[in-house]
Image (cartoon, helix red, strand yellow):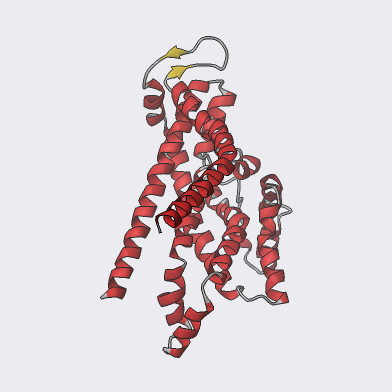
Amino acid sequence: MVKEVSMRMNNTLRVRRFMVLGLLPAVVVYALFVFVPVIWSAYYGFFDWKGIGAAKFIGLKNYVEILHDPVFWRALKNNIIFVLASVFGQVPLALVLAIVLHKNNALQRFLRSAIFMPMVLSSVIIGMIWQYIYHPQIGILNFLLDKLGLASWKLQWLSDAKIAIFSMTPPLIWSFVGLYLIIFISAFQNIPGDIHDAALIDGAGGARKLFSITLPMIWGTVQVALILCISGSLKSFDLVYVMTKGGPAHSTELLATYMYNSTFSSYRYGFGSAISTSIVLISLLIIGTSQWLTSRKQKHAEGRAHS
């Protein structure tokens, strides 16, 4: 008996060593290209540095300047709009589409591929497509409004500072909804068929089965989708930079474009490093808050189910 237990422990240790050795190269590469740059950037956030020459230590002055810069607060507000548009646009829409398109027939496979297609395209291409859609003279959106007798609704979608940031949300949602669609369909397919059969026997069908069984069982996947959604929205850059470059009058400025312009246009690498560190801290705060809220909701639902 003791010998058998010892052999099992040795096998477990071998498996763990194999897993560590297998993961080690990826962890090292990830650390070199993610963790080290983040730490390096946080370090230079305390310096006045132009990319060349000596760096002058200035303490928290970069962060104080950020907090007093109205462009930063405008960029943060726009990023929050992006986060809300993603959380309440991409995730619910992808969930509804996954419910409708989770079956494996030819039509639904085609529709899933069509919805996923924007994920294959470059963000530059997506930005150029939507630039033409929104074009005030040759854009298809104003053309359709004109043909439908809604000429008064025609706007300067990307040139009007009041609506430009809201005009950026449809391409943002369209770009990534396919990713969450595939994630949710995979989660649906991993639910054992026995559970669905038992629900039918108990008389649970349609909406009751969806809200009482299916959604609680994929809630962990929804939480992961929310993390991806929030982190992706907070680091949005290329789509906005291609379409508006943060204009007009900083109306579509995001934290990433604010960092880029402050770093590479003004050659203030220390200030840009402080902005990038602020983005990381804001991301951690928002993601942590969202996870606390969703976990609290899940525990509340589980408590009601047990009672």
Q: Nearer the viewer, residue 90 or 244?
A: 90
Q: Please say whether residue 232 is visible from this viewpoint.
A: no
- Taking 275 as reference, is 227 above or below it? below
Q: Residue at x 32, y 69 (%)?
A: 302
Q: Residue at x 53, y 29 (%)?
A: 37
Lateral position of residue 29 relative to residue 294, left or right: right
Lateral position of residue 59 relative to residue 111, left or right: left
Q: Please, which residue is most extreme toward the top here?
A: 54
Q: Nearer the viewer, residue 248 or 99?
A: 99
Q: Residue at x 69, y 44 (%)?
A: 124
- Taking 188 as reference, is 151 above or below it? above
- Taking 16 as reference, is 95 above or below it? below
Image quadrant holding the N terminus, namely: bottom left
Question: Where is residue 163 shown, x and y percent of the image?
Answer: 53, 50
Question: Where is residue 204 shown, x and y percent of the image?
Answer: 43, 86
Q: Please say whether residue 306 is visible from this viewpoint.
A: yes
Place residue 4 in its image quadrant: bottom left
Question: Where is residue 61 shown, x and y percent of the image?
Answer: 38, 21
Image quadrant holding the C terminus, namely: bottom left
Q: Nearer the viewer, residue 59 or 2?
A: 2
Q: Nearer the viewer, residue 129 or 14?
A: 14
Q: How many numbered discs sit on the rendered protein?
A: 0
Question: Where is residue 42 shown, x and y percent of the image?
Answer: 45, 27
